[in-house]
Amino acid sequence: MRSRNSGFTLIELAVTMTVLALLAMLAVPNLSAWMQSSRVRTTAEYIQDGLRQAQAEAVKENRTVAFILTTSQPSSTTFPAPVAASTSASYWYAATVPWTSAALTSGNSTIGTITTSSNTMNLVAMGITSSDASQVSVQTTVPTVCFSPFGRLTSTYVDPTGVVTCGAAGATVSYAVAPTTAVTGSQALRVTVSPGGQIRMCNPAKSLPTPDGC
């Protein structure tokens, strides 16, 4: 008896390769959607964490602290102007804002040795809005928000140096985080700040009272 060599025939190999190719074609869209959604969630967490840092610093230092979206990288001595409303941002930073002129001349003991000449912004924290800004967009109609020493949004503050203009505090501020070019199955997220200072991340595709709905 002759022994038959084990192995695949050319037809069997061709069928196997065709099946694998079809499975790969089905998996690619799902993988792309998952990667986009992952980038969006990471970016939303960057924004959420930055807002919370600004809020915590305001309460800790008993100072007004601004959270600002910008297109230029900030530093301890450079405070870029905020982006225009509804324009995608690349960076964010949080900074204590100058005391008002009225506060400086009121003799308020909490001001300490601050004088008009040294009344400048101080950087609290900074970061990027996205690890890949070409893939994820961050936009808001209120590029600058200010937290009061009570951790609430405030718009009554007037910066004597004219650097900071706090956004309206009478309504919830929303940061839209979405893929720059969405694929089927990917999701967008939203980070919101209520007038009372509640910061949360939610899914605009879902509605309240769903726990993660907007």
Image: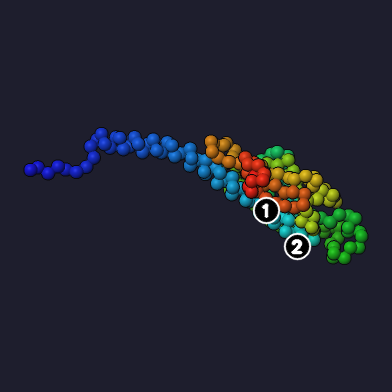
Circle 2 packing at 10 Å, graded few (<14), some (14-19), many (20+), is: few
| Residue 130, image x, y percentages | 61, 47
Percent position of residue 159, x then y? 83, 50
Describe the element under mark 2 as helix, strand or loop. helix
Indicate how the structure is coloured in the image.
Answer: rainbow
| Quadrant housing the C terminus | top right
Can residue 188 be seen? Answer: yes
**Left or right side of 56 for 182:** left
Residue 59 x %, y %:
76, 60
Tell which circle, 1 or 2, labels the residue nearer the N-terminal end. Answer: 1
- Kind of residue indicated by mark 1: Gly
Quick check: 26 left or right of 67?
left
Residue at image point 62% right, 51% down: 45
Residue drawn 56% across the image and 44% down it: 37
Residue receiving disc 1: 50
On screen, residue 27 versus residue 206, left or right, reads: left
Q: Secondary structure at mark 1?
A: helix
Q: Nearer the viewer, residue 17 or 72?
A: 17
Estimate the x, y position of residue 44 in percent, counting from the top left: 63, 48
The reply to whether the C-beta atoms of the residues labelled 1 and 2 are less than 8 Å apart is no
Q: Which residue is mark 2?
A: 60
